[in-house]
Amino acid sequence: MILVYTHKISGRVNYIFRHLFNNILQKEVKFTTKIEEFIAYNGPKFSYSPKALGNEFHITPHPILFQQGIKHQFIQFSFWNDIPIFFQTSDSDLPFDIFSASFYLLSRYEEYIPHRKDKHDRYFHKDSILSLQGILNQPIIEIWTEAFKKSLQERFPDLIFEKRRFYFEPLINVSMARLYKHKAFLRHLFGGLRDLFSLKLRLFWLRQQVFWGNKKDPYDTFDFILQLKKKYNHPLTFFHLLAPYSLFDHNISRNNKVYQTQLKYLADYADVGILTSYYAMENEENILEEVNFLEKIIHKPIVKVRAHFNRIKIPDTYQHYIEAGLTKDYSMGYNAKIGYRAGTSIPFYFYDIENETQTSLLVHPTVISDIMLRYLYKLKPEKALEILIDQGEQIRKYGGNFHPVFHNFILTDLPYWKEWNKIYIETIKHFSPLNTVKNDI
């Protein structure tokens, strides 16, 4: 146990200390506001207060953890042993306040501040302080925590920390369960005409075969995904889009009985979550309706959620998720950029600054997706696999959670996804054998 003296135990202090010590460093921490108790303690201890009390490990706090609401924060980066830092301090055993800096990132403080939005009305990744500093691709909180741990051990040589265990779980976005099958006749007709006029005759013929029941739909890869799950013994979650057809939501009808039967089947062999629709970002009623619809199909409670297109608005969307009974979110990432939106790969509870409280929503960061690599980065399959493996190994190094996002159609045999099925297979082959412990908080 580590004893921490602080002059005030605010909600923010309690939240971020518990996360960094209990969750990341796997070490119990106890607070005290009594100077006498702190001085009398003979074990590892440090003070988090304006002034040191003696010869203990000491960090001078930045004011953000003792404030309420949103206030302007001056952010200026510098370097400590080649590590980028901000919220610098003086007269401390660390040159910056790791707790305040981590809180700023985890709470998504910068997303409460008026900001520029991209074409999908999302927080624009280019304006993130991590992006502006050029470190969006690093789990900076884990890097800070590792350096902090070494500093504590230098002061307290007998202090031992257990290493957090790496956890790997791919996520399958089912935004289009079928390419041709079970779609309305008009969608089939116009799609076929488009194939003809663009001289895609092979696709036109495939469309006819699939639509009229003579061939399996190329996007119906679910049996193969489950076979791979069984073979490599890795956890897996399917996220299903069950919203009416719209400009950005293109799945087949959720009322299709064959599709509903498949949803029940998948729920028997893997975890299932809801992929909230494009227009649900600020619409609590849509979220509730979509969750309830999926629960009625599979006869199980839904607790996992991802936002289609990663369309979340902090804090509104997360507040709606909580109201809908969802407890595990997998939307904390950017749709157009590889990176750690909250500066971490380790799950953390969402702290609602509007209500100054730690919520029940456990946020699982996502860093990378197949769509991002294929269409935005325009990479060849070999390079995409290399980046996926490198990203996962970086997360493994710090005992984080690696949740690469794939789509069911990556395993299709269609020409324009040729060789991409190997990306999925090789990724799970590489990481699954070492996945032995689930690292939720």
Image (cartoon, grey):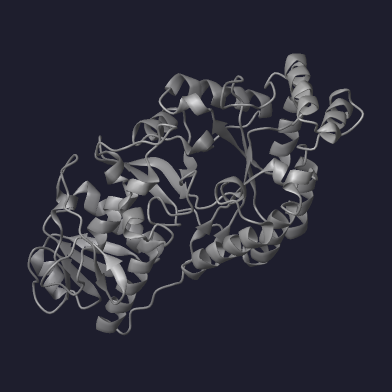
Q: How many marks?
A: 0
Height in image: 242 above or below 22?
above
Height in image: 272 above or below 233?
above
Residue 80 vs residue 124: left or right? left
Determine which quarter of the picture holds residue 321: top left
Q: Residue at x 56, y 33 (%)?
A: 275
Q: Nearer the viewer, residue 259 or 131?
A: 131
Q: Position of residue 81 (x, y in %)?
A: 29, 77
Q: Nearer the viewer, residue 162 or 189?
A: 189
Residue 109 vs residue 365: left or right? left
Q: Position of residue 384 (x, y in %)?
A: 62, 58
Q: Residue at x 44, y 52 (%)?
A: 347
Asked whether the viewer can see residue 307, the reply is no
Q: Residue at x 13, y 59 (%)?
A: 33
Residue 408 vs residue 70: left or right? right
Q: Position of residue 67 (x, y in %)?
A: 14, 46
